[in-house]
Amino acid sequence: MANVLTALQPSGILHIGNYFGAIEPLVQLQNEGHRNVLFCVDYHAITVAQDPTQLRKNMLFAIATYLAAGVDPEKTILFQQSRVSEHTELGWVLNCIASMGELERMTQYKDKARGKGENVSVGLFDYPILMAADILLYDTEIVPIGEDQKQHVELARDLAERFNKRFGQTFVIPKPQIRQQGARIMGLDDPEHKMSKSAASEKNYISLMDDEKTVAKKIASAVTDSESTIVYDVNRKGLANLMTMYSLVTGMTMIEIETMYQGKGYGDFKKGLAQAITDYLKPMQEKINGYLTDEASLKQILDLGAEKAKHLAQTKMKLVREKIGVQL
Ligand code: TYM
């Protein structure tokens, strides 16, 4: 049994990249009997401007989605980051052992800050430190994530090692767990870059809430190439990405998909894929909508989760205060 932890930002939609990159792997680990922690990182989300009313809605939607995806609050500690103030407290302590240079090397920061000049928020720069605190507070051993978060987990490892060396054994060294297939779902309109919630066009992603018509439209307009065969080839990036999604939602291997579409072209393949995605999403959407009708129960689940998380976080933070010498 290992300590598993992951978290997602409650920013608007959740797309199938988020689902296959982080949520599904966490549910699998939960069902294998590991000790799981999952939370909604609202304090990460505010590193870029958020509308408060919308943020609140996004958070409830995110929790409803985790439950619909199979997260069991009896087995997984499910909560909201801002309710456990030890996250920001440990973040401060880690700020004091991390270097500017380390944070300047974070590629996600560089991507997000590009073009913003001096207007970029300090929070956006500091974001990986809060993420390190999220992970280290709970003696996390495994962090299931998509490929884009690997560098952040490596920073958490470095900070844990540095802290332990300076102050004595305090933190467990976490390991990222990145699935082989589905850890980097690419944008439908741009297979060179990952599918992203903040993409300029809605044609970039399949939201977990997209209906049949929307899925069909988005898949029909997905960028592919001028070849006519349905064959998995990493150099045919658009098709490889669509075949990866096909495989994830149906459980079929690439060879099985190739055989199914032998002698057929993109038209048939895209229709089949859109149908397979819809069949996969529909039952989850029904469950999400069901959970959303009962806000009180969602809040109750979050209250209980925060209580359990707080208990663990307080114990770790007490040890940290002792180690650094602020505990009298
Ligand atoms: P976030 O909210 O951007 O993304 C949530 C999870 O989805 C994965 N992901 C993808 N996986 C496959 N293909 C994609 N196109 C794709 N896009 C996103 C991400 O890798 C992530 O696993 N900083 C984190 C949230 C965080 C966190 C943590 C994660 C805060 N504290 C502690 C783990 C542990 C983030 O912004 O993820």
Image: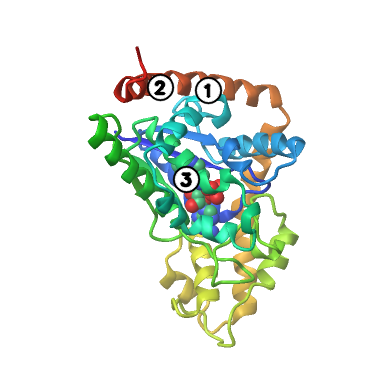
Mark 2 CB within 8 Å of ligand 1: no
Label whose residue precedes the other's in the sequence (1 or 3) = 3
Label whose residue precedes the other's in the sequence (2 or 1) = 1
Rendered position, 95 above or below 257: above
Residue at the spot 59% in from the left edge and 74% down from the top edge:
269
Amino acid type at image mark 3:
Pro
Amino acid type at image mark 1:
Ala
Q: Which mark is residue 194?
A: none
x and y percent of residue 147 in the render?
44, 57
Residue at the spot 41% in from the left edge and 46% down from the top edge:
144
Neighbor class of circle 1 (other Cα within 10 Å; few <14, some 14-19, many 20+) is many
- The label nearer to you, 3 versus 2, is 3
Can residue 19 be seen here? no
Can residue 217 be seen here? yes
Choose top left, top right, bottom left or bottom right for residue 141.
Answer: top left
Are circles 2 and 1 on residues that touch, CB within 8 Å?
no
Residue furthest bottom in the image: 227
Residue at the spot 59% in from the left edge and 87% down from the top edge:
226
Rendered position, 265 above or below 79: below
Asked if residue 286 lies left or right of residue 169, the reply is right
**Where does label 3 land, which residue?**
128
**Where does label 1 land, which residue?**
306
Choose top left, top right, bottom left or bottom right for residue 129.
Answer: top left
Residue furthest top in the image: 328
x and y percent of residue 272 in the render?
61, 68
**Where does label 2 land, which residue?**
312
Residue at the spot 59% in from the left edge and 82% down from the top edge:
265
Amino acid type at image mark 2:
Leu
x and y percent of residue 189 in the render?
64, 71
Q: CA distance from mark 2 to mark 1?
A: 10 Å
